[in-house]
């Protein structure tokens, strides 16, 4: 297949991608099993990523970031996906959490939190979903009651990535009336949060190295100055503005993993023999993998269009949703067909194709379920 170059990758972005690749090859992939067993990566892994300048590359440099753009984030997410790493929750920490602070935070919040997120000393999480539901964000029940100079937070959050490791959790909580206009985002520093506890690691079917937990807030007192943005009730609007970038980040990883799955399956099919010839010699295998390669390429071209639009500040929520749902559907379908090529070995976690398959499933659910993505697309028609 002819070489394809993504239009948003210039020399500098390519350099960041190479740096990321060597980091994941050296410091993440060889430790995947250990990370899975402990349900988290090492703290030092975050710090190493920070020292290399891989965390918060698109946060402004005066606050410790790399001063780059989403292209730098995307290059790192791409390499992570091309190696099928599902341990380091890079996107949550780097592509999502710091951007709420950069876009809406006070100068004091930026100085307090962004340098730590960029160095890896402070690990970030965002807590939107609740046991009663994750899709309907307007219905968030967690309450933040104002008492003098503090908010007092009570409620529960489910499926929170970095749930036990995070030093900073951006909590979506109700500070006012029912519905969207009563929501705010509050930064909770976990070290000082008496009354905050978490459940055990959730036993997921994939992404075993990620620290996914329930969080419980029992009258947790947080300084009122930790309200993200100085005005209450802006939380839902902030989420709606930032979620397209989160969805694009998921799409980047999904397409990268889809390409990698095809590459792995082609290589395996050419090496493995059955009935005296290679799997590749069976027309069924070639047709399947030709279809997978084509679908991955089509997804990548649309993804690249979305990235270019985002870099120009023109990506709308509906187009980001199209990219998220389409690329994660494509990934699931490709991972399934490529795993089949591996036969029983595809079901064994030692093979990256098994990791890709298990990790693909949740991508159609988190970051907004794909049905919600289609609702957003439909609203734009
Ligand atoms: C591994 C993992 C990591 C996660 N990390 C985080 C995190 O860091 N922070 C965070 O806040 N959340 C996180 N989540 C939660 C995730 O965002 C939610 O699971 C997701 O938004 C769906 O919410 P729910 O599970 O409550 O499903 P529900 O909202 O109960 O929906 C269930 C299903 O119903 C369907 N559905 C729902 N609403 C509609 C609709 N309007 N139209 C059509 N169909 C609909 C969809 O198929 C959906 O999958 C994570 C989840 C997982 C599994």
Image (spheres, rainbow, N blue to C red):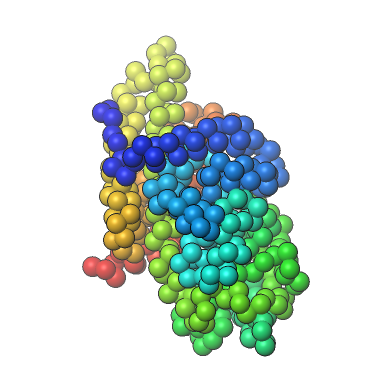
Looking at the picture, tell me which residue is in the foreground, 25 or 157: 25
Q: Residue at x 69, y 73 (%)?
A: 217
- Horizontal side, residue 270 vs residue 176: left or right: left
Which quadrant would the C terminus be assigned to in this image?
A: bottom left
- Report whether residue 96 is seen: no
* Residue sticking out furthest to the front: 62
Please count the marks in the image: 0
Residue 379 shown left or right of residue 123 in the figure: left
Residue 2 position (above or below residue 98): above
Which residue is rendered at x = 53% and y = 58% of the image? Answer: 63
The percent position of residue 329, horizontal first and vertical second, equals: 38, 49
- 24 w.r.t. 278: above or below: below
Residue 120 can be seen, yes or no: yes
Q: Position of residue 182 (x, y in %)?
A: 50, 83
Residue 85, compared with residue 247, is above or below; it is above
Q: Is residue 250 left or right of residue 119?
A: left
Residue 248 position in % (x across, y down):
39, 54
The structure residue drawn at horizontal position 39% and vertical position 32%, both measured from the top left corner, is 262
Give me the residue at 35% from left, 59% from top: 321
- Locate residue 333, reporting x and y percent: 39, 43
Extreme residue toward the top, this view: 276
Q: Observer-nearest residue: 178 or 314? A: 314
Quarter of the image with the N terminus is top left
């Amino acid at each position: 297949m002819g070489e394809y170059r993504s239009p948003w990758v210039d020399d500098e972005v390519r350099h960041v991608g190479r740096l990321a690749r060597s980091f994941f090859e050296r410091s993440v992939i060889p430790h995947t099993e250990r990370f899975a067993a402990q349900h988290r990566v090492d703290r030092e892994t975050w710090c190493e990523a920070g020292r290399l300048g891989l965390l918060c590359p698109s946060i402004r440099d005066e606050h410790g970031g790399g001063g780059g753009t989403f292209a730098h984030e995307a290059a790192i997410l791409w390499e992570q996906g091309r190696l099928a790493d599902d341990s380091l929750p890079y996107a949550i920490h780097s592509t999502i959490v710091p951007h709420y602070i950069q876009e809406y935070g006070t100068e004091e919040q930026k100085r307090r939190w962004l340098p730590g997120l960029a160095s890896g000393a402070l690990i970030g999480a965002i807590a939107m979903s609740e046991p009663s539901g994750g899709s309907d964000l307007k219905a968030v029940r967690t309450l933040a009651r104002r008492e003098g100079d503090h908010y007092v937070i009570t409620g529960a959050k489910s499926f929170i990535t970095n749930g036990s490791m995070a030093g900073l959790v951006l909590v979506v909580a109700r500070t006012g009336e029912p519905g969207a206009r009563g929501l705010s985002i509050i930064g909770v520093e976990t070290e000082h949060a008496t009354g905050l506890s978490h459940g055990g690691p959730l036993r997921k079917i994939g992404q075993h190295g990620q620290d996914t937990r329930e969080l419980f807030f029992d009258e947790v007192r947080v300084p009122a100055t930790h309200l993200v943005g100085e005005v209450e009730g802006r939380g839902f609007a902030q989420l709606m503005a930032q979620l397209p970038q989160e969805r694009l980040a998921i799409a980047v990883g999904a397409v990268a993993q889809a390409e990698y799955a095809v590459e792995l399956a082609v290589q395996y099919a050419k090496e493995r023999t059955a009935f005296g010839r290679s799997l590749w010699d069976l027309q069924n295998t070639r047709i399947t993998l030709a279809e997978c390669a084509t679908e991955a390429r089509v997804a990548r071209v649309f993804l690249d269009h979305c990235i270019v639009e985002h870099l120009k500040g023109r990506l709308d929520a509906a187009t980001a949703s199209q990219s998220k749902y389409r690329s994660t559907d494509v990934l699931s379908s490709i991972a399934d067909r490529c795993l089949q090529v591996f036969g029983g070995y595809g079901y064994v976690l030692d093979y990256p194709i098994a990791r890709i398959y298990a990790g693909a499933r949740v991508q159609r659910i988190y970051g907004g379920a794909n049905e919600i993505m289609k609702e957003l697309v439909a609203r734009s028609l």
